[in-house]
């Protein structure tokens, strides 16, 4: 699977409160509306200027804080194709895979705001088309790729009817 889009760069320690600001808690049952406010506290222009397929690029410990499953879900609903970060909070990482949002750990220091990126999930590469550079990441385990290709864990269960990740 090849993904292509523009980089939106954020720093270290972007929390689930940055992703889904608490003042919009009342929208948690209306995720498309909540997605209009995704990462608003980290970059007020992000949600309104994001183009489908763009990437969130961050530093260390992306998604720390409470284990709100709606945080990765609204990133995906907003149109982000993947999140690239130096590291992820464990629960956020698992929730992202469960909802079908690719999350990739790699050194993001060479990626700047607005860079055009091409990500090959199978090969484990990120091509920075703006800088003519290539970065590598550890390809996701086959079981995670399967869940992502199925659209998340719920869709995987619907497709196979059980917890058969080998199919």
Image: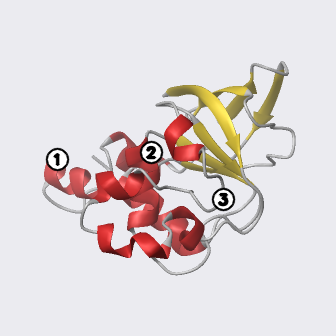
| Disc 2 packing (10 Å; few <14; some 14–19; many ≥20) | some
Q: Give the residue at x 74% y 28%.
A: 115
Q: Give the residue at x 25% y 51%.
A: 156
From the viewer's perspective, tell me whether residue 86 is left or right of residue 3: right
Mark 1 or 3, nearer chain start: 3
Q: Secondary structure at mark 3?
A: loop
Q: Secondary structure at mark 1?
A: helix
Q: At which x and y percent is residue 123?
A: 62, 31
Of the pair 163 and 48, the residue shown nearer to us: 48
Which residue bears the numbered disc 3?
A: 42
How far is disc 3 from disc 2 in space, using C-alphas?
29 Å
Q: Nearer the viewer, mark 3 or mark 2?
A: 3
| Disc 1 packing (10 Å; few <14; some 14–19; many ≥20) | few
20, above or below 79, in the image: below
From the viewer's perspective, tell me whether residue 48 is left or right of residue 117: left
Which residue bears the numbered disc 1?
A: 159
Mark 2 or 1, nearer chain start: 2
> In this figure, which colouring scheme has been used for the structure?
secondary structure
Which residue bears the numbered disc 2?
A: 145
95, above or below 56, in the image: below
From the viewer's perspective, tell me whether residue 131 is left or right of residue 115: right
Q: At which x and y percent is residue 135?
A: 79, 34
Q: Give the residue at x 47% y 51%.
A: 75
Do tag 3 and tag 2 residues touch (Cβ < 8 Å)? no
Q: Secondary structure at mark 2?
A: helix
Mark 3 or 2, nearer chain start: 3
Q: At which x and y percent is residue 47?
A: 51, 45
Q: At which x and y percent is residue 50?
A: 53, 36
């Amino acid at each position: 699977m090849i993904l292509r889009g523009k980089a939106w760069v954020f720093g270290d320690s972007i929390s689930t409160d940055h992703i889904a600001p608490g003042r919009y808690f009342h929208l948690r049952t209306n995720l498309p509306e909540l997605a209009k406010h995704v990462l608003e506290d980290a970059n007020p222009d992000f949600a309104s200027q994001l183009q489908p397929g763009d990437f969130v690029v961050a530093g260390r410990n992306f998604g720390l804080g409470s284990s709100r499953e709606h945080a990765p879900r609204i990133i995906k609903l907003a149109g982000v194709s993947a999140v690239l970060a130096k590291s992820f909070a464990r629960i956020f990482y698992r929730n992202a895979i469960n909802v079908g949002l690719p999350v990739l750990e790699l050194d993001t220091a060479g990626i700047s705001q607005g860079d055009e990126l091409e990500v090959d999930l199978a090969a484990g590469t990120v091509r920075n088309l703006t800088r003519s550079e290539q970065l590598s990441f550890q390809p996701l385990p086959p079981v995670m790729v399967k869940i992502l290709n199925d659209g998340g864990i719920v869709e995987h269960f619907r497709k196979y009817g059980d917890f058969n990740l080998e199919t």
